[in-house]
Amino acid sequence: MFKEKCKRIIKDFLGLLFCNNLRVLANIYKTDKRGHDYLEKYQRHFSSLRFKRINLLEIGIGGYDDPNAGGNSLRMWKKYFPFGRVHGIDIIDKSALAERRIQIHQGSQSNISFLETMMEMVLPVTIIIDDGSHISKDVITTFKFLFPKLRKGGWYVVEDIQTSYWREFEGDPENLKNPHTSMNFFKQITDCVNSSEFERAEGSDGTFDGQIDAVHFYHNMILIKKK
C-alpha cells in the first residue's frame, strides 16, 4: 500500500511538471493512447481549451473486468485540463478509480436511459471521447444521442475507427459503402458541414444540419467539432 502511494505521488508530481505535453503525460500515466497516433491530434485541437473549466466525458475506462484497473487516460486528462472535470463511463463498476475531479459512471453506452440520466450530472460537456465497445451500432447510437447535447464549439471524438472494417465489431472489410458501419455513418454526416448550401439532400434527414462545424478524419480516429 505504501509503495503504491509513493508511486502515485511521484506520478502526480511529474504530471504537474509536464502538464502541457500530452505525449509525456500519456507515458507517465501509461495510457494505451500511447500506442496510437492520437496524442498530437488531441494536442493540436484541444490546446485552446487547456485552462477552461470544461467537462470531459470519456466512454470506456479500461482495465477490462478488473474493477481496480484502468482510468489511466482519465488521469492524463485531469492533469492536462487543470480546471476541468473528467467523467468516465464503463459497463464494469470502476467506482474505485474515482478521485478529485474524476467522476465514474457505470452503464452501457448503448443504453439511452442510462445516458440520459448520466448526462444530467455531466452537462455542460465540452469534449466527448468514444473509446468504448467500438461496435458500429453502439458508436452510431451513442453519437446520435450525445452529440446534440455537446456544448457549442465542443468536440466529439471516436477512437479506433479501424473496427469499422472488422467483422467482429460489425464492420465490413469488403463493402466500403456498407451503410451500417460507423465509418460510413460519419462519411455521410460530412455533408452537414455545408447544410446551408442545399435545400434537402437525398439520404439526409437533417438531424445534424447546422450543428457541425468540421469533421477531421485521421488514421483510426475521427474528430467532429460542433458549430
Image (cartoon, helix red, strand yellow):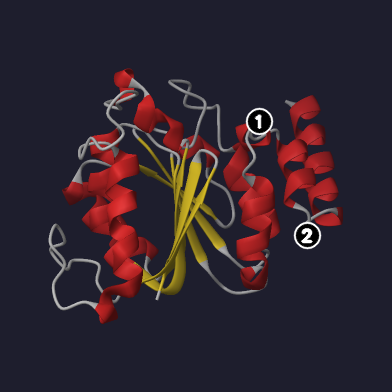
Residue at the image point whose x is 31% and y is 23% from the top: 174
222 displayed left or right of 204: right
Tell us which disc is closer to us: 1 or 2.
Answer: 1
- Find disc 1 in the rendering and name its residue: 35
Is residue 148 in view?
Answer: yes
The first of marks 1 and 2 along the sequence is 2
Residue at the image point whose x is 76% and y is 37% from the top: 27
Q: In terms of image quadrants, where is residue 197? A: bottom left
| Label 1 residue SS | helix
Coordinates of residue 73 in the picture (x, y in percent): 60, 42
127 displayed left or right of 39: left
As drawn, 63 above or below 156 = above
Mark 1 neighbour class, 10 Å CA radius: few under 14, some 14 to 19, many 20 or more: few
Q: Quadrant of the C terminus?
A: bottom left
90 displayed left or right of 179: right
Residue at the image point whose x is 38% and y is 62% from the top: 122
Q: Which mark is residue 171?
A: none
As drawn, 116 above or below 170 = below
Is residue 92 in view?
Answer: no
Q: Quadrant of the N terminus?
A: top right
* Total numbered badges shown on the rendered structure: 2
Name the residue type under label 1. Gly
Name the residue type under label 2. Asn
Q: In terms of image quadrants, where is residue 47? A: bottom right
Coordinates of residue 178 in the picture (x, y in percent): 23, 35
Q: Which mark is residue 20?
A: 2
| Label 2 residue SS | loop
| Spatial separation of the CA atoms under disc 1 and disc 2 | 20 Å
3 displayed left or right of 163: right
Coordinates of residue 17 in the picture (x, y in percent): 87, 55
